[in-house]
Amino acid sequence: MKHFLIGICATVLLFGCKNNTEYKNYLHNPDLFSNTVHELNTVVMGNNFPPMVASRNYAYAAIAAYEVVAASNPNGYQSLAGQLNGLKTISLPKDTVGADIELAALLAYMKVGEAVTFPEGSMKLYKDSILAIARAKGLPEAVEKRSQELADSVGMSIIRWSKKDNYLETRGAEKYTVLDIPGRWVPTPPLYASAAEPHWKEIRPMVIDSAGFFNVPPPPAFNITDKNSKYYQEVMKIKNAVDSLTPEQRHMAEFWDDNPFKMNVTGHAMFGSKKFSPPGHWMSVVGIASQQAKADFGTTVTAFAKTSIALFDAFIQSWYAKYTYNTVRPETVINKYIDMNWRPLLQTPAFPEYTCGHSTISSAAAESLTSVFGDNFAYTDSTEIEFGIKNRSFKSFRAAAEENNWARFYGGLHFHNSCIISTEYGRKVGALVVDRLKMKK
């Protein structure tokens, strides 16, 4: 008993005599973590990161936060070291006693999120605002110091690991060669931009063994002359659908557009508009689900980490297929062979058509979220309301992914066969992530 009392006195001297839990109520609120993800989402949007790169931003940051939680509660959460490709160990400070785990998780998320984006200091004002509020609510200086030490140690482990995923090497890699071959992808209006991230398949995945781990079947052979061919039927199916969209179908397509940078053209004037990218949309859904489920802090962090990992690997799998088959977009085919004035509802992204990245990553995310919050988890997705697009409600995460399947078709961006195949293989990626990762015990 004497030693126990001595220990209590030492703790009081180190961290202050005031029994103030106000700062804990603030820092330990799962909604604060979701808001922090939203802040990174805003940074990613503001700096025009393409969707696949955005998935990298979210994944490393969320893993850092999760590793803080796992280090603090090894009986409840299992480290991802040894589970994710190339992540062998997580460095921890010699003494973590006195650290506020939730604060450390927030700090680690912001540290890594800032490191994998730009410009330097992109989350500094937000971080400073959190600390200012926590201090005003009684956060002891010693607790803040220990929390920062824990966050820095874990964060640096994740940053060192991130630098070996081949991202930097692909920055200067050879650009995509445009060839005038029937059925092969070429740039599309209005930007006629170069193919985005043709070497993304060379990025180290996190859970799947390799980019080509799942053997995606080839798309229907290009054949625009035979009206009985599968390809011709797919072309006419999407043209006819876009030409006769209902208001509901238009809303569906616009809701799932998630174009991070749309070029608007009015006469001779051109201006860009921004929205969250596809992975950013799903990060928002994680926050919505966590709040609705009244999930605790650890579960919320786990949901973000697992879902971001599924998104990351799903992009690598899809980009492997895209730049294996190099499939032409519907807009190009219809303009050249059927109707030169036809336009899709949505603006065509600058990369090959097959497979559909959005359908792939959406079904992967749905599997991850289902594993955390359960199937038949009904929710209303309010992600797009800040961009002037009304909410949509879903009976489950898988139902949302299925709707995305149709949305890309109604938008005029993908043949429906592509969406179906992409949904199937994205689901396989998500299921593998769920099966292989041992996280919450």
Image (spheres, grey):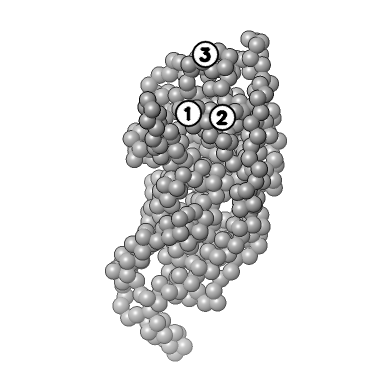
Q: What percent of the width, then of the height, locates residue 370? A: 52, 43
Q: Badge 3 is on which residue?
A: 339
Residue 190 shows which numbered tag?
Answer: 1
Give yes or no for contact between labels 3 and 2 (Cβ–Cβ under 8 Å): no
User: Residue 369's spot in the image, x, y percent?
Assistant: 51, 44
Of residues 86 and 75, the one nearer the viewer is 86
Tell which of 126 and 338 is nearer to you: 338
Tell me the quarter of the image containing the N terminus.
bottom left
In the rendered image, which quarter contains the C terminus?
A: bottom right
- At horizontal 50% and vertical 51% (from top left) the residue drawn is 58
Q: Residue at x 46, y 44 (%)?
A: 48
1 or 3: tag closer to the N-terminus: 1
Q: Residue furthest bottom?
A: 2
Circles 2 and 1, Cβ within 8 Å, touching? The answer is no
Q: How far apart are marks 3 and 2 (CA)?
A: 18 Å
For residue 203, side relative to residue 380 (left or right): right
Q: Mark 2 points at which residue?
A: 187
Specify the quadrant of the image occupied by residue 414. Answer: top right
Amino acid at circle 3: Asp
Q: In this view, does 214 lie above or below 438?
A: above
Mark 3: few/some/many CA within 10 Å (<14, 14-19, 20+): few
The disc, 3 or 2, on the residue closer to the chain's N-terminal end is 2
